Image (spheres, coloured by chain):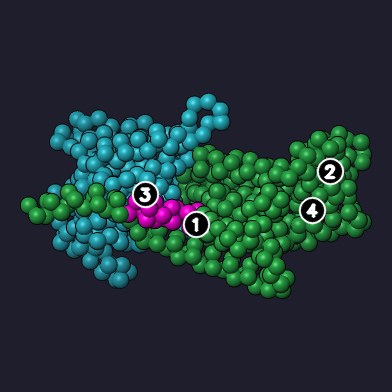
Amino acid sequence: MEQKLSTSATPGQGALQNAPFGFLRRLLLRPEGSIVVVAIGLIIYFESTNANFLTNLNLETLSQFVAAPVIIACGEIMLLICREIDLSAGQVYALAPFIMSIGAKAGLPVLVAFGGALVICAAVGLVIGLITVYLKVPSFVTTLGMLFLITGITLTISRGFPADTPGGPVLSSIMGQWGYSEFLWALGVVAVMHVVLRHSRWGLHTIATGGNIIAAAESGIDINRIKIGNFILTSTLAGFCGLIEAFRIGSTDPLAGGSNIMFLGVASGVIGGTAIAGGAGTVIGGLVGGIVLGVLQDGFTLQGINAFAFDIIIGAAILVAMITNIYLAGRRGAGPT
Amino acid sequence: MNTPSSASPAPALRAEGIVKRFGQVEALSGVAMQVANGEMLGILGDNGAGKSTLLKILTGFHRPDAGQIYVRGEAQNFTSVDHARSFGIECVYQDLALVNSLSIFHNMFLNRELLRPGWPHLLDHNEMRHRAIEALTDIGVNIPSVDVEVGRLSGGQRQAIAVARAVASNARILLLDEPLAAMGAREAGLIIDLIERLKARGDIAIVMIAHNYAQTLALCDHVMLMQHGEVTYKSAAKDTSVVELLEIVRREYQDARRK
């Protein structure tokens, strides 16, 4: 009798007591959940210590800083999931605006030159994919070589000079010049890639390829096609990102982007909960990871942190975020569903 | 099968005089086997006896150098695994071909995903979830939720999922590669129950490769021993015993040593 009473009382009571905590716990146990909490915490912290943080002007700056790593992350996440990486994404990012500029100078309409640049970037991804898959060179090595190769090509075709971005004011605004347009593009890419990863055969087969390549092959999945496709996707997204940055800034330096933007993209993905060992990942997490990196950078800049100390803080923050994530991933694996 | 074999219809799967060479090595030298619907054949033998090679010929992975395979009485020459599959031959390999980071229902529909009608043909998660539950319930496998990642299941549960996937994809001839290997008694019991239920359906023929004599005799209707690419002994399970099988193997070892 007593036992029966207590069992009937406990659920109601427990639900009441645990309502906020239970929600937090469920959020934390999602792959991208912990980083959402970190992001909210950081935003609250910086807003409380600096009145300029959540102003329109600063949000615009923040959104522009976040956009590029997030777009690159969307490609890198797909590659990380199928156990590959593209180290040359930042160089493709710089190459694309120069191809568009050459096309426009040759008399092509800007949008055609824009499309042509994307096609060239896709071709770079195809070459990386073919070398990696058929010559069995690890993608780390393939894309390291490609990194130097493309830097050289960009420097050669630009002769070391920046290129002005073609196009009229309306097009430029849509593509990146208006304060939030670059961020809106990033959100669009995230939305599409989230659907691709979670709700398309391509995404499922990408996870299967990274999770168990033998199982994927035995079930008839064309693993080579999946890998090559994701290399093409990553290079194309990197090129797209370089192009809209070119529209925002108005010109492009041949050494723009580079390894820094690539690593920010990879870091966004990994901080957001994508496993570097493959087989699992989240695009939404990549978006939040990118926001965290941006908030850290922007917040500390507003606080006037010394530029030398800045990298120490960013580095430490990335480490803490990743350790937390790995710890919570372990809890997810151990705990009940 | 209660009816005498002469009166029963053609066996679901039959192989005659199967020979397979890898370079100089003759892995199989004239092997014959057969299994009927509702029956189970157990193949026993040491490593290197040719069990796995025979299995891979039956799945269409290898092509035999001589001999003939008959499916439901008709001669067939499998050109690929997919070709053999089109006759309802499904094999559950030891590695199980499961993706740990995917849910049970995604694994059960891996590369046979159900899509929503209309562009852009996104995955129909709900339909796959329901059909996976149906398929598992159908063969009596109890899993609390098909949304659980396969990596969190026990060895027995994983084996059950792999078997359920094969059955759900319309397996008429089920080939099992060491389904009870590296499994505790309770886990093995789960799979043994599952195999018993599949046998009871009467429309599936099962071939199992195994090491454990007692389990094989308890589960199978027929057993055969293989040694050096040949079938050295065949019997109905009820007409032999673990002691007799071990005695045959012991004599084989002695003969081999004398040569």
Q: Residue at x 13, y 51 (%)?
A: A5
Q: Which residues are magenta?
A: A18-34
Instruction: In the displayed orientation, state which residue is furthest to the top.
Output: B118
Q: CA distance from mark 1 to mark 4?
A: 34 Å
Residue A271 position, x and y percent, is 56, 60
Residue B178 placement: quadrant: bottom left
Q: Are marks 1 and 3 on the same chain?
A: no
Q: CA distance from mark 3 to mark 2?
A: 47 Å
Q: Colour of chain A?
A: green
Indicate which disc, 1 or 4, sits on the residue closer to the N terminus: 1
Q: Are marks 3 and 2 on the same chain?
A: no
Q: Nearer the viewer, mark 1 or mark 4?
A: 1
Query: In the rendered view, does B86 fall on the left or right side of B4?
Result: right
Q: Secondary structure at mark 3?
A: loop
In this figure, which residue is indicated by the disc labeled 3? B148
Give the main secondary structure, helix, strand or loop, of the magenta stretch: helix
Is residue B126 visible in the rendered structure shown here?
Answer: yes
Task: Look at label 1 and name its amino acid.
Answer: Val
In this figure, which residue is indicated by the disc labeled 2? A100
Q: Disc number at residue A37?
A: 1
Q: Residue under mark 2: which chain is it in?
A: A
Q: CA distance from mark 2 to mark 4?
A: 11 Å
Q: Residue under mark 4: which chain is it in?
A: A
Cβ–Cβ below 8 Å for labels 1 and 4? no
Q: Residue at x 26, y 69 (%)?
A: B254
Q: Secondary structure at mark 1?
A: helix
Instruction: In the displayed orientation, state which residue is furthest to the front.
Output: A51
Q: Are marks 2 and 4 on the same chain?
A: yes
Q: Disc number at residue A94?
A: 4
Residue B18 position, x and y percent, is 39, 46
Task: Look at label 2 and name its amino acid.
Answer: Met
Indicate which disc, 2 or 4, sits on the residue closer to the N terminus: 4
